[in-house]
Image (cartoon, grey):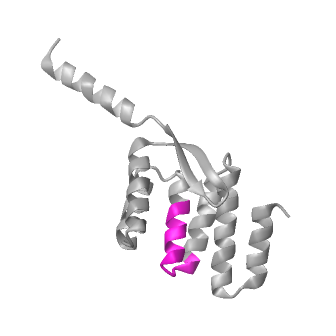
Amino acid sequence: MSRNFKGFALLCLLLALTSCAAPVRLPTEEGPVVYDSQPAVVALLSDAERETGAGDLDRAAAALERALRIDPGDAMAWHQLAKLRLQQGAINEAISLANKSTQLANDTPALQRANWRLVADAYDEKGDTAKARRARERAFGN
């Protein structure tokens, strides 16, 4: 076997292994949410959580944005970015990002509820109590 073929075969194997989804447990207000995500995305979500804890919201946002470039369909990454944007005072963006996460989280009701609570909190921040109430009703199934 040629060296080029062995190198190519190893590269294909590495790509296959790193692109496999892995189960992830992330905390939400509802309790832990378990879902599948790519290992690189999981690492970036962890980085973002660490940066948020250290108070570096800009670095946390950069990690989440990188995660979304890797997997734009990752509902948890959209949720985490929505939470971060709400912390940063970008209320309309937080609502939009949480709505995107909700659309992608079809098979994760706990994450959908967490998104609706985040939307309710954002509308509270805006002073729109009627929309906040409706979002809470969606979160709690009323």
In depth, the one of 49 and 22 nearer the eye is: 49
Instruction: Measuring from the top left, give residue 98's x and y in whole percent.
Output: 60, 65
Instruction: Measuring from the top left, give residue 124's x and y in whole percent.
Output: 68, 82
Q: Quadrant of residue 111?
A: bottom right
Residue in view at x 64 percent, y 86 percent: 126
Label count reads: 0
In depth, the one of 4 and 125 nearer the eye is: 125
| Left or right position of 139 against 84 | right
Instruction: Measuring from the top left, give residue 58's x and y in whole percent.
Output: 37, 72
| Residue, far left | 3
Which quadrant does the N terminus fall into? top left
In depth, the one of 88 and 4 nearer the eye is: 88
Q: Which residues are magenta?
A: 79-92
94 versus 110 height, above or below: below
Residue in view at x 52 percent, y 51 percent: 74
Residue in view at x 63 percent, y 84 percent: 125
Q: Is residue 75 visible?
A: no
Q: Is residue 115 visible?
A: yes
| Left or right position of 52 against 35 | left
Q: Is residue 91 magenta?
A: yes
| Residue, far right | 142
109 versus 121 height, above or below: above
57 versus 89 height, above or below: above
User: Magenta: predominant secondary structure element?
Assistant: helix
Residue in view at x 61 percent, y 50 percent: 32
Q: Is residue 131 magenta?
A: no
Instruction: Measuring from the top left, give residue 36's x and y in whole percent.
Output: 54, 41
Which quadrant does the C terminus fall into? bottom right
